[in-house]
Amino acid sequence: MKIAILAGRSPDKPGWLASVIGSFLKKQLKCETQMWFGNFSGMDLVNSLRKSFQPDVVINAVGYSGEKSISDCENDRKRTEDSNLQVVYNLRDSCLSGDTVIIQLSTANVFDRLSQAEGEAWLEDDKTGTKSVYGESKRWAENALYDMWSHQFVIIRIHQPIGKHLHQRNLIHRLGNFRIVSSEKNSFTYVDDLAKNIYQIALNRLSGVFHLVNGPPISLAEMVPLYQKYVDEKFQPRILTREDILAENLSIRTPIILSSQRADKFGLKMGKIDDVLIDVMSAYACEVNGAFVESKV
């Protein structure tokens, strides 16, 4: 099985998710994996990929989610749509004539945060819809794939990815800078589990929509003691409820909870969040300490 990963503009700066997924897939004996870089908003590179490598599966791990946060997308609609939507149009048009499967990495942000009651979870077949530029671009990208044969596409929705890496997209890496954290439950995706399940999806030729999150939902406030234990004992953010946040008119995004009902049905295993967080926090602490030691040398 040949797998191509759209990994970013340049090999010098691959996307975080693409790097994690590519690193895992390259160790698997049952597939040949290549990372592809460049501007995929044009057809030339997409067609070149299909003709020269002839992949069975293409994983779209590129996209724009803002320089610091998805709120940045509101100010750069063109870049957001070129990166998140036009690339998918090109992949779809190129792959329609063959039997290549597209695995599209999507997001929980295709749902309207404000219409979800506290504690409820979005199912895979729930109606999508959002007012954010980022969420809409990803929702349109999903809709574009519905024009293909049903066996030719996979949509994987994730939320708040976490891992051991010193990367700005890693929620654990950003957590230490938070002055305020919410006590509301949220969904999170452990990137190592994501990579393993993408492999299983490709290997077993699964199709359709999957929510890959590590349950049960947990709040950032519940992560604080683990962060203090493994990473920084001096970390002391304010912990606020939804009512506190609304009362103080703070710009903190409302959490989104995803149900992984369909993933469970197909035997896709995501670790329990409590176990995952212990492994992630301890491994991340080692990465932080290693970087600190190197900076002192």
Image (cartoon, rainbow, N blue to C red):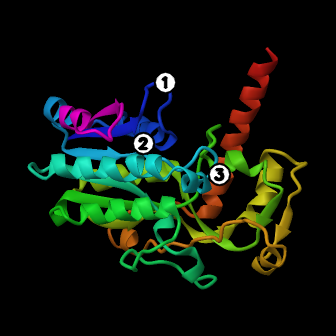
Q: Amino acid at mark 3?
A: Leu
Q: Amino acid at mark 2?
A: Ile
Q: Image height check: is 270 above or below 227? A: below
- x, y (%) of residue 207? 25, 63
Is residue 289 found left or right of 134 in the rendered image?
right
* Mark 2, secondary structure of its residue: helix
Quarter of the image where one finds residue 35: top left
Look at 25% across and 33% down and name the residue there: 45
> For mark 1, what is the residue?
12
Query: Viewer-proximal residue, 264 or 50?
Result: 50
Query: Viewer-proximal residue, 49 or 120?
Result: 49
- x, y (%) of residue 89? 26, 52
* Mark 1, secondary structure of its residue: loop
Report the Cα–Cα distance between label 3 and label 1. 22 Å
Query: How many other residues sit within 10 Å of disc 2, few (<14), some (14-19) or many (≥20)?
Result: many
Is residue 232 found left or right of 262 in the rendered image?
right
Q: Is residue 33 magenta?
A: yes
Does residue 269 appear anywhere in the picture?
no
Quarter of the image where one finds residue 47: top left
Report the Cα–Cα distance between label 1 and label 2. 17 Å
Q: From the viewer's perspective, is the residue at label 3 or at label 1 nearer?
A: 1
> For mark 3, what is the residue?
171
* Disc nearer the start of the sequence (3/1): 1
**Badge number at residue 21:** 2
Is residue 281 found left or right of 55 in the rendered image?
right
* Mark 3, secondary structure of its residue: helix
Range covered by the magenta-colored residues: 31-48
Look at 84% across and 67% down and name the residue there: 239
Q: From the viewer's perspective, is the residue at label 1 or at label 2 nearer?
A: 1
